[in-house]
Image: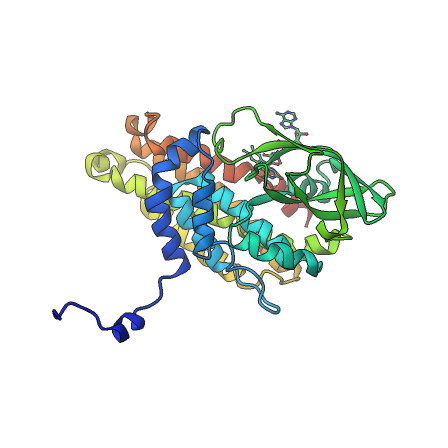
Amino acid sequence: MGSLALSRVEVLDQPAPSIAGEVARIAREQLAPLAAGIDDGSVYPAEVLRAFGAVGAWGSHMPLEGPADLRCAIESMAVIGEVCGATAFMAWCQNTLVWYAANSTNLKLARRFGDAFSTGRVLGGTGLSNPMKSFFGIEKLKLKGRKVEGGYIVRGALPWVSNLGPDHFFGTIFEREDDQGTVMFLADCSDPAITLTPCKPFLAMDGTGTYGVQFRDVFVPDELILADPAAPFVKKIRAGFILLQAGMALGVIRDCINIMDEVDSPLGHINRYLPQQPVHFRELAAELEAETMALARDPYNEEETYWRKVIALRLRAGEASVAAAHAAMLHCGARGYLKSHRAQRRLREAYFVAIVTPATKQLRKMLADF
Ligand SMILES: Cc1cc2nc3c(=O)[nH]c(=O)nc-3n(C[C@H](O)[C@H](O)[C@H](O)COP(=O)(O)OP(=O)(O)OC[C@H]3O[C@@H](n4cnc5c(N)ncnc54)[C@H](O)[C@@H]3O)c2cc1C
């Protein structure tokens, strides 16, 4: 046997590939060729989402008999976002769905869906933008529910829910018609009383399986109730919901730095006059990452100071994404103005980080209301 061959013992001694490392490999090999198609809306990457699930991308943040740790999930979304911001958003949708099921005290539901969601066998997302806005006094709840034997009848419509398809699930909230509070549940898109309507084309994110969802007197059985009442559950999951979004931001920012670096050789002599340089964004990304990872170790922290830090971090993450993408455009010049260059895709993706709920304006309101 040649000297380069490894014995079985030596092979077993090699460090196991990390989840984020495996996710990065799949992102390079399978996702990168699809990124332009996802961006223009001609591709919804179900198979790649399942491949990420198969290497553990959607399961690492599930609580294990108490605490939960979101760091690996966030890093995995960041490496996806370095390749495709829209897919990082779908990753967040899937991770959030897993987060809901894993935190539910409805054990039947957790048993039925826990593995299916965390392995990516069943895909889906979250319709919490409207409830998150309603809880902070921005708009009224759009879904209403009436108690009946064995469950609720739900009606109403949500304008945008992503990572959906005919066999997908998503978590959302309705208001009880009898004024007895709010209830969080899983919506089953295969229910004939639920209609998915394609949205008008967006600026970006068209390949994210985003639909308007109408509920026409949908029967939601007790088995699909995530939390009744919803309020204490939302308090428990809200920091995780927001912190996981940092993965999208970190991915977009990292690639904007890559873009600036790529044009340094031909254009560095003139780009050095621009006020914002890759070094600034490297520092900013490192700061954001350190803060994110510190908060991500403790998503059930109930202190108000912790919650304030999560909101402030999320605000900075959105603003830094837009700033990095703006700088990448200026560094690229005409090269980045070509439709075929990813700099302009990054700019459009970065705006999404800043407008997806909780949007920049909501975050500023939340901080102002403290
Ligand atoms: C591509 C995309 C994907 C999204 N995916 C999800 C998701 O998976 N889950 C989820 O819960 N939310 C999703 N959203 C919604 C998103 O999180 C934000 O809630 C949304 O971008 C608006 O947030 P805002 O706080 O800026 O509200 P604003 O835009 O200030 O106000 C929102 C309200 O304005 C009204 N409105 C806005 N635009 C229109 C319009 N074109 N026609 C009619 N009424 C309108 C609606 O009543 C809406 O509730 C998605 C949005 C987009 C653009």
- Residue 157 x, y percent position in the rendering: 70, 32
Q: Is residue 352 visible?
A: yes
- Residue 17 x, y percent position in the rendering: 35, 62
Closest to the observer, 320 or 32: 32
- Residue 212 x, y percent position in the rendering: 63, 31
Residue at horizontal 85 percent and vertical 47 percent from the top:
149
Quarter of the image with the N terminus is bottom left
Residue at horizontal 54 percent and vertical 51 percent from the top:
95
Q: On the rendered structure, is 46 left or right of 189?
A: left
Q: On the rendered structure, is 37 left or right of 315?
A: left
Closest to the observer, 11 or 232: 11
Name above or below for residue 200 compared with residue 276. above
User: Quarter for ligand 1?
Assistant: top right
Name above or below for residue 292 compared with residue 333. below
- Residue 259 x, y percent position in the rendering: 31, 39
Residue at horizontal 59 percent and vertical 49 percent from the top:
97
Q: Quadrant of residue 142?
A: top right
Residue placed furthest toward the left = 2
Residue placed furthest toward the bottom = 9
Q: On the rendered structure, is 52 left or right of 139?
A: left
